[in-house]
Image (cartoon, rainbow, N blue to C red):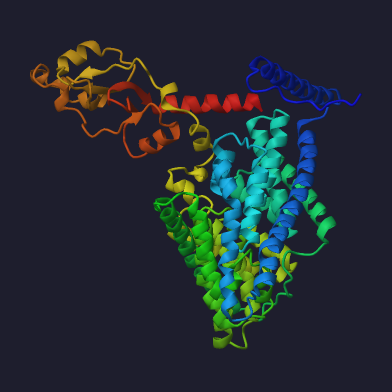
Amino acid sequence: MKRQPYRRPPRWSTPLVLIHDLHLLRRFVRLRRGVFSLLSRLRVSENTLMAVLAVGIGFLAGLCNYAFRSCIDFFRWLIIDNGARLTGYSPDVWDANRLWAIAFPVIGAAFMLPFFIRYKEDMAFGFPRFLERVNLRGGRLPLRLMFTRGISSALTIGSGGSAGQEGPIAQIGGTAGSVVGHLLGMSEERLKVLIGCGVSGGVAATFNAPLAGVFFAHEIVLLSSFELSSFTSIVISSGMATVVSRAMYGDIPAFDVPAYQLVHPLELVLYALLGIVCGCLAAIFIIGYGKTKAFFDRLQVNPLWKPVIGGFLVGCVGVFLPQVQGNGYGFIEKAVGNDVGWLLVTLLIAGKIVATCVTLGSGLPGGTFAPSLFIGSVTGMSFGFLANLLFPLQTATPGAYALVGMGAFLTSVTHAPMTGIFLLFEMTGSYKVIVPIMLACSIGTAVARHFRKDGIDTADLAARGIDLRAGREETVLEKIQVRGVMMHDAEVLPESMTIRQFLERAHTPRQHTFPLVNTGGGLAGVVTIHDFLGVVFEPDILDQVPLGEMATTDAITVQGDESLAAVLRKMDITPLDELPVVDSGNGRVIGILSRREVIAAYNRAIVERTFRA
């Protein structure tokens, strides 16, 4: 008799559903316990376990990179190649058929509408949200994110949207690391390392550049929180993913670049100027992206129309400058190979910035890494043409400046100089490029930071008041609310109380700052112990002056649902070490929070995290 496949019980059969889910949960728990029991019997150390997991995650990241790139090629074949064959569209011919460039990204956006309807949260889960989840929310990512973000990003790039594949593949690889760590019950700290392993593997496989993958994970995702154990695991994963990528694509770099040559020491001055130009353009790019995103957020239309409108606008730019569509890798090779004219590359600086801002600002998924490389290459090449015109005997070809411009603009936009430096070094394989690229990248990053504190990946978070680069302390304190730490039974005084009455009851105060309330129970001000140092020697006024006349009426307050990180920022701008806590609804005083309690809460959190690890 043929065995029937298992069917999940119907929804109305709640007891059976619960029994089924409980059975699966017990099997999973037994499996996880069995794995850790086996590892303990084999006396596998923590570092060895992380190294083994890094190998597996790197292998997964390499396979995910292959699948993602295959999806991009498939959608490009399905939409653009077949569309060009049916319509007669050619980007090299100026005729009416060029208008079909508008249709391709619109078709891609239309294909994504089911994702926007069914997986709305996933489609809004861009790289900034990914960084927030990894650094502030525990790092647990759902498995479906690999498919929803992967397929939708491949549709954006494959249909001609101006976006990159590095941000999505970093999310895909990071999600793979998160899923593996969650299945094995890893602590929050280990889970973050495994996510970094997946990110480094995905980026390394994309560029065939293992060192760039390592520094991308550390600088951009883990925010430069260097630890030797995590660094080792990330290096292993990056190397493994590169091996997988080379096995499938061959040992070839992401871009076929000519050998770099420094012609004259004068060029170092020109590369420094190029760094300044890239830094200024990067700030414009970051500001433009933010304003475009804000425009689409305010746009009073059905949210499902926004990506379609974005695709339409990108297509309009593509009619005149078809090079801006897609990831632009092919054109980058032409730029560094000196196969493009000055006028075209100069126009493409503005064209690519506009196309990328519209694509990503409208909600179409994708990354900013490849567009940054594109803008940097055309900026560098345009600068190189000018340098050759002014100093023909002392300068290299414009392609050399395009190569350095790629790294300088990338680091300026992301505020991650080491990633750009090592990416360029691995692409060229030449030590001669190190000094020019270090000079241009460092200057460009400094200029961009002067105008914009946050890079393009964290600018959106900064606009919402989230500062990922505030350090480990603030990351921990972001998760702790005032309500769980404050002194609930703090002494609150009426503003009409006299100084003598206060001195008679404040012999051994537990607090140094006293909130004063009016007849309605609202905060009228605060007084501190230091306010009475000179008054106690004037007995004539002890019964005449109420506390309300001595109070600081513009005192800074906090609310019970605020994070301790926000409290510390407020304490930095006030001389008080104790702040009144007020109810967000009615403004009544509900407690006192001191700097001492904040530090104690942080120490407890660090100890708990250490024991969980």
Residue 543 sits in quarter: top left
User: Quick check: 308 above or below 115?
Assistant: below
Q: Position of residue 175 (x, y in %)?
A: 67, 41
Quadrant in the picture for the N terminus: top right
Q: Residue furthest front?
A: 1
Q: Position of residue 186 (x, y in %)?
A: 69, 30
Q: Position of residue 463 (x, y in %)?
A: 43, 48
Mark yes or no: residue 248 visible. Answer: yes
Q: How many marks?
A: 0
User: Quick check: 504 above or below 380?
Assistant: above
- In front: 227, or 591? 591
Seen at 45% across and 35% down, the residue is: 565
Residue 29 sits in quarter: top right
Residue 511 sits in quarter: top left
- In front: 206, or 73? 73
Seen at 54% across and 37% down, the residue is: 136
Please indicate whether residue 259 sits to the left or right of residue 93 in the image: right
